[in-house]
Image (cartoon, rainbow, N blue to C red):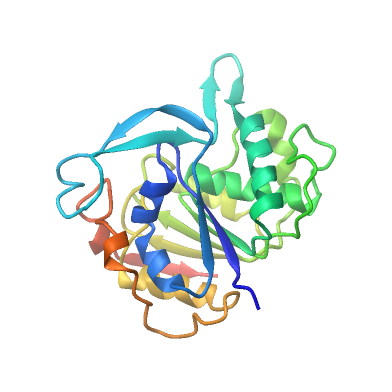
Amino acid sequence: MSKPKILCLHGFGESAELFKIRSRNFRAIVGDSAELVYLDGPIDIGSLHMTTGDLEEAEVESEFTNLAWWWMRRGESFEARGLGKTLDFIGKVLNEQGPFDGIMGFSQGACLAIVITLLLRGSSADGPLSLGEVDHPQIKFLILAGAFQLEVPEYGYLYAEKVDVPSLHITGTYDTVVEPERSQLVQSFFESPEVFEFVGGHFIPQSPKCAKVMRAFLARFVPGIESTKPKAVDASSVAAAAAPSSNDNAAEPISSTA
């Protein structure tokens, strides 16, 4: 029996390699119970340099490729430049590397995860967005951190119906990049969202309590994650998080609701 596959989508200005570091808690939980596929966004927007603090305990290069899934242009109208290219790329990945059971996304990657899920469900078949000719089953679950709606008016049709896909939403109360209200709006699109809210900003918390919530959620879909103890990740493949705040590991949740 093949392992479940989980597609992992980084945020704006990140990369697959950087997202592996920032999602190390998630990787430790999954261990070898599932295959994690981290993708690089196809839109190159330059280079992102990590600070000395970020690199203090990290055995990584001092520069990461700065990638995105689209570039939001705000003028007289909103435009997600490069989104069509990204959807073509995702369609190819689904056909060639799938099927994927779930998607883990952060920020812009979480937004994209929802779009992929909706397009695969066929509820938006008459709209302008498409994955192309794709032969892939529906996504079974989503883990969304710092998620927001694709804020282009012409794509509002995507969210016309409630989404009945199981979802875990991770939201920081002091997130100034994606304000909590924007993430709460996304939660309202789902029929039965599970929410983990923590005191912190725009990142995936590495706290034991966040790990406990993720583990309980994943155990419903990935055989082998029933244990209450996280599985170890090879130390040689894990670096310290490139976190925006020194309070990352200390972040504590204030609520966990279904």
Residue 43 lies left or right of residue 210; in this view the side is right
119 shown above or below 238: above
Residue 58 rendering spot, x and y as whole percentages: 21, 53
Q: Which image quarter holds the N terminus?
A: bottom right
4 shown above or below 227: above
Residue positioned 53% across, 70% down in the render: 34
Q: Quadrant of residue 12?
A: top left
Q: Say whether residue 251 is visible.
A: no
Residue positioned 59% across, 64% down in the render: 5
Residue 225 rendering spot, x and y as whole percentages: 49, 80
Residue 57 rendering spot, x and y as whole percentages: 17, 55
Q: Say whether residue 40 is visible.
A: yes
69 shown above or below 144: above
Q: Residue furthest right?
A: 126
Q: Quadrant of residue 50?
A: top left
Residue positioned 59% across, 14% down in the render: 76
Residue 184 lies left or right of residue 189; in this view the side is left
Give the mark count. Answer: 0
Residue positioned 19% across, 52% down in the render: 246
Q: Residue furthest top?
A: 76
- Pick the front one: 195 or 39: 39
- Pick the front one: 236 or 159: 236
Residue 94 rendering spot, x and y as whole percentages: 68, 51
Q: Which image quarter holds the C terminus?
A: bottom right
